[in-house]
Image: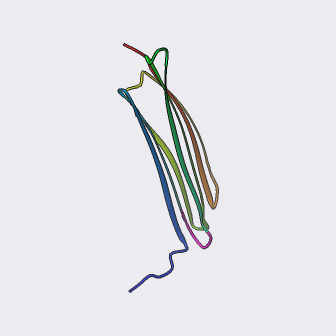
Amino acid sequence: MFITDLSYLETISANESLLGGNSLLQITSYADAEGEDTYTLANANTDLKKVGNGQVTIGKGTGDALAIGADTAIADVSYDAQGFDKVISIKISGAGENYAFENLKVIAIDTPA
C-alpha cells in the first residue's frame, strides 16, 4: 500500500541553541495539526550577550508555536537553561476547537561566582 497524499497532516518543529562560556540556552518549538486544511508555525530564537567586561552573561530566547487543524492541533514550546544563576520565563498558551498556540519568552543571567 502506498500513501501518496499526506496533505491532511502537517508537523513542524524548530530548535535554537546557543552556548556561551559555561552557559547554554535552548528553545524548542513544536506544532502538529491534522485534518482537511492544516497550518503549522514553529519559531525559535536565542541571543547571548556578555556585559560587564565579559563577566556577566545574559541570554534571551523566544519561541512560538501555532497549529490549526480540523481534527487535532498541538503546540508546545520549551526551554533548557544550563549554567545560569537566574532564569525568568513567561509562557502564554491557548487552545480551541481547532487551534492551539504557545508563546515563550526567557531571560537568563549568569553572574561570576
In percent of width and height, residue 41 lies at 58, 56
Quarter of the image that includes the N terminus: bottom left
What colour scheme does the image use? rainbow
Numbered-mark total = 0
Which is more toward the observer, 94 or 110? 110
User: At 35% from the left edge and 27% from the top edge, which residue is drawn?
Assistant: 22
In percent of width and height, residue 61 lies at 52, 36
User: At 64% from the left edge and 55% from the top edge, which residue is drawn?
Assistant: 96
In the rendered image of this protein, does residue 108 appear above or below residue 26? Answer: above
User: At 55% from the left edge and 74% from the top edge, which residue is drawn?
Assistant: 7
Q: Which residues are magenta?
A: 33-37
Determine the main secondary structure of the stretch shown in magenta: loop
Residue 11 covered by magenta stretch: no
Quarter of the image that includes the C terminus: top left
In the rendered image of this protein, does residue 1 appear above or below residue 33? Answer: below
User: At 53% from the left edge and 42% from the top edge, which residue is drawn?
Assistant: 45
Residue 83, quarter of the rendered image: top left
Left or right: residue 51 compared with residue 68: left
In percent of width and height, residue 44 lies at 52, 45
In percent of width and height, residue 72 lies at 55, 63
- In the displayed orientation, state which residue is furthest to the front: 53
Which is more toward the observer, 74 or 113? 113
